[in-house]
Image: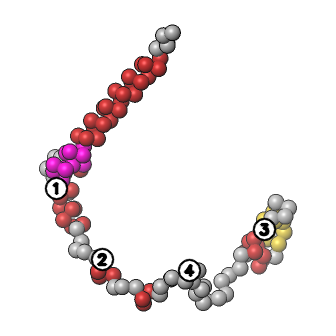
Amino acid sequence: MYYKFSGFAQRLVGATAAAAYTPQGLKPIVSTESPAPIFGTSKLASDLPATDSFLSNNKVPDLQKIFQKADGLPVHLKRGMPDRLLYRTTMALTVGGTIYCLIALYMASQPRHQ
């Protein structure tokens, strides 16, 4: 016996094999035509410019050589001075924010003077 979920009764009910394999009224796609464009400004793929205009040379092999070099540096510092500046700025902001939060917590814990 086959079962399907009944949206009306909110439980499983007996069904035929065809109804059980297409639950909730889902039917196989019959039409192979593409739907009409929703917006009037849609362009066909043949009208678009060639993709070569925005493609550049692949930088991944060069970056792999830099990041996979066994020089003992952590990955977030491998590219030199810009990485060091970003790392130190992040650490300074983190320490500064922690200190600020602790000061704000201390001030909030003190009773108010009247």
Give the labeled residue for mark 4. Answer: 39
| Local secondary structure at mark 3 | strand
| Residue 40, image x, y percentages | 55, 83
Q: Colour scheme used in the picture?
A: secondary structure
Q: Nearer the viewer, residue 13 or 8?
A: 8
Q: Amino acid at mark 4?
A: Phe
Give the labeled residue for mark 2. Answer: 54
Lower position in the chain sequence, tag 2 or tag 4: 4
- The quarter of the rendered structure image containing the N terminus is bottom right
Tell whether 53 sits left or right of 104: left
Quadrant for residue 29, please give it: bottom right
Give the labeled residue for mark 3. Answer: 4
Checking the image for residue 58, the label placed there is: none
Marks 2/4: CA distance? 25 Å
Q: Amino acid at mark 1?
A: Lys
Marks 3/2: CA distance? 51 Å
Q: Which residues are magenta?
A: 76-87
Tell whether 13 sits left or right of 45: right
Seen at 78% across and 76% down, the residue is: 19
| Residue 89, image x, y percentages | 25, 41
Q: Amino acid at mark 3?
A: Lys
Q: Nearer the viewer, mark 3 or mark 4?
A: 4
| Local secondary structure at mark 1 | loop
Q: Nearer the viewer, mark 4 or mark 1?
A: 4
* CB under 8 Å between discs 3 and 4: no
Give the labeled residue for mark 1. Answer: 69
| Residue 69, image x, y percentages | 16, 55
Lower position in the chain sequence, tag 4 or tag 1: 4
